[in-house]
Amino acid sequence: MDFITHWLGADGRFLGLTRGEIWLTVGGAGQAVFFSRFLVQWYATEKRKQVTVPALFWWLSLAGTLLLLIYSIFYVKNWIIIVGYAVSWIPYIRNLVIHQRHKDARKKCPGCGDLCSPRANFCPNCGTRLNVAPA
């Protein structure tokens, strides 16, 4: 007995959906979450007027992949699809780690208080010289 079968009612339905419809909903949700990451990236790029990949892109990639992995394991049961989703999360996690390290290394501008790139010598917002360690 799998997880879904355990929660099905006497008529074989859960929230009015059959077992197959439930799994199609999980797969469809995974595809929708995975697609939404492109909208997030597009919006961020248009807003900054340069190619930008925000952390939310990687979180959506991870969530979509997890939903599609669950769908492929319990419904599709195709080992090629399962293997594809089972390993695709690795670069997403790595990019989230890199993003967090970069975020933690930012410098605070003494002039305006804005957080600046760790490699910046001057604040892009107000032009104030940032504290630069001697070479």
Image (spheres, helix red, strand yellow):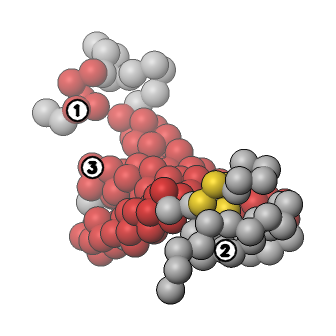
Q: Residue furthest front?
A: 134
- Residue, x 79% and y 58% (percent of image)? 43
- Residue, x 85% and y 60% (percent of image)? 126
Residue 131, image quadrant: bottom right
- Neighbor class of circle 2 (other Cα within 10 Å; few <14, some 14-19, many 20+) is some
Task: Find residue 68 and report its horizontal and vertical position in percent.
Answer: 41, 55
In front of the other: label 1 or label 2? 2
Which callout, 1 or 2, points at the residue further toward the start of the chain? 1
- Neighbor class of circle 3 (other Cα within 10 Å; few <14, some 14-19, many 20+) is some
Residue 22, image quadrant: top left
Q: Residue furthest top?
A: 10
Secondary structure state at the residue bearing disc 3? helix
Residue 74 badge: 3
C-alpha gap between disc 2 and disc 3: 49 Å
C-alpha gap between disc 1 and disc 2: 52 Å
Residue 120 badge: 2
- Report which residue position mark 1 lands on: 3
